[in-house]
Every structure is written in structure tokens, then in C-alpha cells.
Amino acid sequence: MVDLLSPTFLTAVLAAGIVAGIPLLFASLGETLAEQAGVLNVGLEGMMISGAFVAFVTALAVGDYWIGLLAGGIAGAVVSLVMVVFCIRLGLDQIVVGIALVLTAEGATSVLHDIWYSRSYPRLPNVEPFRIPLLSEIPVLGGSLFSQPLVVYVALAGVAFAAWAIRRTRWGLELRAAGERPDSLDAAGVSVVRTRTVAELMCGFLAGVGGGYLALVGAGTFVPFVTHGAGFIAIVIAMLARGRPWWCVLGGLLFGISLSITTALQVAGIAIPVDFVEMLPFISVLVVLVLFVRESRLPSALGLPYLRGSR
């Protein structure tokens, strides 16, 4: 029996929680930008799984996970063009289009995986961690927080930049106006469609990178439906974050650890049904929603199409 309080076990749990939480961080950060602009990105899951598949195919071909992550981000942005065209420019229902996008992306990636990899199931080599000198030697925290792939620290830097940009720049003001008072933004001479389009493309790119991270770093391979609902969890995290990117870090870490704890307990020899392990993130979502949903405030124009010149 493994000692559940040993530094080695605690380090492994926290490290696994970070691995599981970083895809949620990328996706929820992108969704935060989209929601602030008034776009409810229900298709986030489809962008993540598209990014995961393209990132895996690219990294397998070129042997570089950075190029794979970039390709995954581009794939997510391309998929987000569906939301741009049908929802932002044509004004169709964002929920209906988003669900259709998810189903299409899941089906397409599943079929392509079956055609190309169903017999070989190739895997990628493990991504080497970037160890921060001195800090990585701290017991428990050092081996988990300060010994991660470099992209983890890039993600945290991106969160810091997004938090600054949303609250301290003209672009951030326009972004929030597109979600709160698009008519006022239109009257000020700024295109609501352009503002929402940029936010949606950024959301798609970040979701694709999150999916790519899940496939390249988390799993080391791609299997159909590899995201397991991570896109929908990211939507909840973004809603509860209320436009504050640092809360996306906390939410991603919370749900990541909730999954890693159960997996670690299984490894430690404690019998936990696999079905419960798969249910735990969603149970955590329900608990968090019950506790904090009344405190969340969404942009007043979220999910509502806007036609230029309307009031």
C-alpha cells in the first residue's frame, strides 16, 4: 500500500493535476475572451478535439511538439470560423451551431483516426520537463509546480497578459463593451462584428492549443473523444471566472486535481470504479455550480446576435 501522505505521492498527485488542468486553462481562457465579447462558445469541445487531432498528426510527422501545438491552435481557429460565419456574421443561434460543431468535429476526428491509426496506435515520446533551478528542489511543490514542460509557464504568462489586456487596454474595453453594450460600441464607431470575430478566433486558437496539449503532453497519443467533455467544463470555469483570467488557473487546477486524486488512489491500490473516476470532474462541476452560480455575472449581451445600427 502506498503512503498517501508521502512527499512522492503528493508530488505525483499535484503534477498529474497540473497536466490535467492545463488544457482546461487554455480552453477556459479562450472562452473568457469570447464571453467577454458576447459569444457563448458551446462549440469549444469541437475546437479542442480538432486541435488535439491536428497537433498529434503534426507532431508525429515532424517530431516537434511546439510545431504540433501551433498546428493544433491553428486548427482550433479554423474550426472557430464556423462560429464566426454563422453566429457572429449571420446571427444564427450560437448554441445550435456550437452543438453541431462539436458533433461534427468528434465524428470527423474519430473517422480519420480509424482510417489512419486504428491498427498501429502510434505514441509520441514523453515531453521533457523544464526544471527551474533551486525552486524545483522544494519538497512536494518543487517536483510538481516547478518541473513542468515549458508550455505550462507560457500558459501562465499568457494568463497574466490577458488579465492586463482585458482591464488596462483600449482593446479590453472594446471587448467588454461588445459583450455588455454592443450598441454603445457601435455608436462609438467600433465594429462589434470585428471585435467579436477577433475574440472568437483567439478563443478557437487557445482551445486548439489546449486540445493539443492534452494529446501531446497529457496522453502522448490521440484516441477518439480524448477530450472527454473538457470543453464543456472549460465553459463552466469561464462563466464562474467572470472575466478574471487568474480564476481560470484556479478552476483548471481544481478540476485537474479532482481527476488526478482518484487516478492516484487507484494506482495506490484503493479500489475505485473506473466509472466514478470519469464522473468525478462532472460531479465537481455540479458542486461548484451549486455553491457559486449565484455569484457569477455574465455579460448582458452574451449569446445575442448583433446587427450593425440596431439599438
Image (spheres, helix red, strand yellow):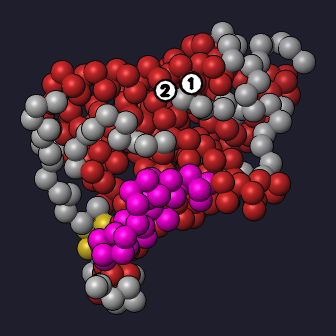
Please name the amino acid that badge 2 sits on. Val
Q: Residue at x 80, y 27 (%)?
A: 182
The verdict on residue 66 being magenta is: no
* Residue 7 on image: x %, y %: 34, 88
Q: Quadrant of residue 70?
A: top left
Q: Is residue 111 above or below residue 249?
A: above
11 in relation to 88, above or below: below
Which residue: 71% across, 32% down? 38
Q: Position of residue 155 (x, y in %)?
A: 43, 55
Tag of residue 210:
none
**Residue 192 showing in the rendered view:** yes
Q: Which mark is residue 102?
A: 2
- Please state the extent of the stretch shown in magenta in the rendering: 258-285
Quick check: 144 left or right of 301? left
Image location (x, y in percent) of residue 99: 56, 24
Given the current orientation, which residue lies at the most extreme top position? 90
Element type where label 2 sits in the image: helix
Mark 1 vs 2: CB contact within 8 A? yes
**Quarter occupied by residue 221:** top left
Coordinates of residue 304 in the picture (x, y in percent): 77, 24
Mark 1 neighbour class, 10 Å CA radius: few under 14, some 14 to 19, many 20 or more: some
- Residue 99: give its label: 1
Any part of residue 12 in sight: no
Residue visible at 73% across and 28% down?
303
CA gap, disc 1 and disc 2: 5 Å
Q: Main secondary structure of the magenta part?
A: helix
Which quadrant: the C terminus?
top right
